[in-house]
Structures are given as C-alpha cells and as structure tokens.
C-alpha cells in the first residue's frame, strides 16, 4: 500500500495513533519536533514523555478511569501495555516510571518498519493528505497559526486555536533519601490497594504555618490570578489556598481515610507523596503543582513534616495547554468537518488526561486506517467510554467548552434507574464493554490487524 498517514506529534496520542495505523499495515510518517525544537515542559526527546504527574489514575474495577483503560486494552493499545510493564507501586492507581515508559515507547515505535520517524517541526498541513494532528497542549506557534487557517478562524464565530487554552501544572519531585521517614507513615486512602503512598501528617498549628507561608509566597509572574484560565481539576496549590483557609484540607491535603498509626486517627491535614520511578529513589508531591518561584517553593514545601531537609529534583511549574474548539470543528470520528482528511487527537482536541489522550490517539489511528483503506469510519458507540469522550468534545457548548477527563457523567444514563451508585457504575461498565466489543468486532472485519 503506497498511501501514507502523516502523524504530527509523537506524544501519547501521536505514538498510539501511529502504532494503530502500523498494526493495520498502513504506512506512517511520524513527525516530532523535539529535539530540534523543545518545549517549556519537556526534558527529553523521547516519545510519550509524561511532563506532569506519573499517574494514569485508578485501576479499581468499575471506575470510569478503569473502564477507559479496559477499552484500550481490548482495542490493543500499545501504550497501555507498556504502562503496565513500567508500573510502580501506587495503591489502587496505575503509575509508571516515566523515564522507562518513554524509553520503551520510543523503542517500540522506532523499530516498527511501517513507521518512518522525522525529527522536524511541522508548520504546514496539506488538507488533502491524510493527517493526524496530535501535537498536544504545547503546540508550536507556527503550527497553531496553520491550525487557525484550517479552522477558518475568524469566520462563523470559530475562535483561533491559540485563543483557546488553559494553564496546567507540574508537581515537585523530591529525592527519597532526603525524606525524614520518622515523621511520616505509609498508607493508601481507605486502605485501598497496597500502602504505597508516603503520608506527611500535619497538626492544626503546622497546617496554619504552611498555609500562611503558601498564600504569601511570591509567584513566578506578578499577574491578576483571577484572569488566568486554569483547568479546574489541576489547579495550582496556591490558587486552591486562596479560595479559603480550609480548601486544601478538602482538596489535595484531605486526611480522610488516611489513619495515622501513631495516633489511631486521621491527621488534621496530610500531604501525600507517590513513588516516581522503579528505583524508588524519588517521589512526587501529589496535587502540589504550583506557580511559585523555585526559592519560594523550597522555603514553603520544607514546612511540610518530613520534608524539612528535602532535596528537590524538580520544582513545580505552570505551562499553557492549547486546545481547539472541537464542538465547532470535529466530527465524532475526530475528522474535521471542513477537511475530513485531517484528524485531531490528544489534548489539543479537547480531552484532558494521559489515558484520554491515548484513547483519542487510538481512535484517530483506527479512523485514519479506515479512510486510507477506502472504508467509512465508524464512531465508537455512545455507551462506551470511547464514544462518550468523542461525543462530549464534539457536542459540548462551544461557547463554554472546557477539556474533560473521563467520568461517569459523560456516559449516557441507563434505561433502567439503579439507585445504588456502585451497582449503577458496574452496570454502566458492563454495557460499555459489551458495546465496545461489538464495535471492535465490526471494525476488525473491515480492517485487518496484524
């Protein structure tokens, strides 16, 4: 087959999209601008580098994150398979050694004969060539301008891509041997999974000192915080604190379900640390993304019990996430309405989260393969996690569009009402997986998978 799919961006979505095309015998040209040109958040030139957390969320059966990962597993996702190979202890969550994960993805993609890798920045898109744009939240300015052209920005009320963005954050990482283990304890919330998290307990007095230091700390830029467009599920720690003195205790520092063995009861507040890599020589501060100056971070975070002498391998940061106004631009097959040979995948299409990005990459790869084979693309069923994600980003209110994680709220309601939440979620997962299996069987009959 001489036709070739062009995939722009080798992050989570782009890598998965390229792999899905290749496993169907479709040749791919995979373009990645790093290391020719880097971004403010990336540290390596590896594919699928995780720049924020190292967690792919819950592995607890019949949760929404589990459902999406299970659909990906059934669909033959490369990245989910590699993630499980690189898993580190994280209670009931799937977390990975991010360096090993990116290395393994890069190796798998690079040795695939159907994928030709080009290390170059792309700033022009031929709307008549089958192309998947998966450049992620840190799309270069040059390509953003080109996407604006494809989007007919300025006409019919369609905003340009670079005007649609939110600020996302990166959590700090500390060296494991700099943590005072005599002041902390190991536990998982509600004892779910294994006790893999380091918990730093705070008394009311310790919390008060930490809170006062945090809200008075100097940020990187002196700006009007109310005008920054943050993604609500990934707010900087200091922004949460500004919303009230106890907001942290009901958010990332919530002590519920984390009984301290020294006292037999939950502490007043708690900071959790999650293992960062397989060697267990570093831990990230869960939910502690921030926009403070590095020196201020060191001063404030060392007020946390157990971190008085912490050595920081990486400080928290803020970066801008660009995304298109998908409800005005995309079909449920991730094709552009006006340019059906161009598809979008990953965070740039309006999903939020690692697994969600992988999922849209997988879907874009499947749909692009169908197009190149002369087969009509078929959107995943609405009842599936796949279908609920694509339905949301293509049917949300375009004037209030915000990127979304997978949640049960995105899935359609069951025909028969079930009051018990756990029973309802279990039934929704059963329906979703049944529908997913049927869809995979249908598209598998049209697309040979090697």
Image: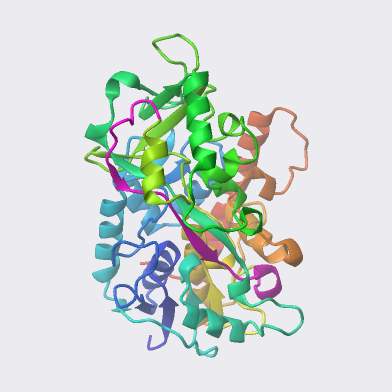
Q: Is residue 25 above or below residue 275?
A: below
Image coordinates for residue 232, horizontal then vertical, percent: 61, 49
Image coordinates for residue 446, horizontal then vertical, percent: 51, 71
Image coordinates for residue 214, horizontal then vertical, percent: 50, 39
Image coordinates for residue 394, horizontal then vertical, percent: 68, 66
What residue appears at the point 30 percent right and 40 percent down from the top-left corner?
Answer: 174
What residue appears at the point 46 percent right and 42 percent down from the top-left corner?
Answer: 288
Q: Nearer the viewer, residue 163 or 377?
A: 163
Q: Is residue 141 above or below residue 317?
A: below
Is residue 258 part of the magenta span, yes or no?
no
Q: Nearer the viewer, residue 290 or 104?
A: 290
| Apparent side of residue 208 relative to residue 332 in the rendered image (left or right) | left
What residue appears at the point 30 percent right and 58 percent down from the top-left corner?
Answer: 102
Q: Which residues are magenta?
A: 304-331
Residue 312: quarter of image: top left
Residue 450: quarter of image: bottom left
Residue 40 visible: yes
What residue appears at the point 44 percent right and 33 percent down from the top-left corner?
Answer: 92
Residue 444 visible: no
Q: Is residue 29 above or below residue 431?
A: below
Is residue 323 part of the magenta span, yes or no?
yes
Q: Nearer the viewer, residue 372 or 360?
A: 360
């Amino acid at each position: 087959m001489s036709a070739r799919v062009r995939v722009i961006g080798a992050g989570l979505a782009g890598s998965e999209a390229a792999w899905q095309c290749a496993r169907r015998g479709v040749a791919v040209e995979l373009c990645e601008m790093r290391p020719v040109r880097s971004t403010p958040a990336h540290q390596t030139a590896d594919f699928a580098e995780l720049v924020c957390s190292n967690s792919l969320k819950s592995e607890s059966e019949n949760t929404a994150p589990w459902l999406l990962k299970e659909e990906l597993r059934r669909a033959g996702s490369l990245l989910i398979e590699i993630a499980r190979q690189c898993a580190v202890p994280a209670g009931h969550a799937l977390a990975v050694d991010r360096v090993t994960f990116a290395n393994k993805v890069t190796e798998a993609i690079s040795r695939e004969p159907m994928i030709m890798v080009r290390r170059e920045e792309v700033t022009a898109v031929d709307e008549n060539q089958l192309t998947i744009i998966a450049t992620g939240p840190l799309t270069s300015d040059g390509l953003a301008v080109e996407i604006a052209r494809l989007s007919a920005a300025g006409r019919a009320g369609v905003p340009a891509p670079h005007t649609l963005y939110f600020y996302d954050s990166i959590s700090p990482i500390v060296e494991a041997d700099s943590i005072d283990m005599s002041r902390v304890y190991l536990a998982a919330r509600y004892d779910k999974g294994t006790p893999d998290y380091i918990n730093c307990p705070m008394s009311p007095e310790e919390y008060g000192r930490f809170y006062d230091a945090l809200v008075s700390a100097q940020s990187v830029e002196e700006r009007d915080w109310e005008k920054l467009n943050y993604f609500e599920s990934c707010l900087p720690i200091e922004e949460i604190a500004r919303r009230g003195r106890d907001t942290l205790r009901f958010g990332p520092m919530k002590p519920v379900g984390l009984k301290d063995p020294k006292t037999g009861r939950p502490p007043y507040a708690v900071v959790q640390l999650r293992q960062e890599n397989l060697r267990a020589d570093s831990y990230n501060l869960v939910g502690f993304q921030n926009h403070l100056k590095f020196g201020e971070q060191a001063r404030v975070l060392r007020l946390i019990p157990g971190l008085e002498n912490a050595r920081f391998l990486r400080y928290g940061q803020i970066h801008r996430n660009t995304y298109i106004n998908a409800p005005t631009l995309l079909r449920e097959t991730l094709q552009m309405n006006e340019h059906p040979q161009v598809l979008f995948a990953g965070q740039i299409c309006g999903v939020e989260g690692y697994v969600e990005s992988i999922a849209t990459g997988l879907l874009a790869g499947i749909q692009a393969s169908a197009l190149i084979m002369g087969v009509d693309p078929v959107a995943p069923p609405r009842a599936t996690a796949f279908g609920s994600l694509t339905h949301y980003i293509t049917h949300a209110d375009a004037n209030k569009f915000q990127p979304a994680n997978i949640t049960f709220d995105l899935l359609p309601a069951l025909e028969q009402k079930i009051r018990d939440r756990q029973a309802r979620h279990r039934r929704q997962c059963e329906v979703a997986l049944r529908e997913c299996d049927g869809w995979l069987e249908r598209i598998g009959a049209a697309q040979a998978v090697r």
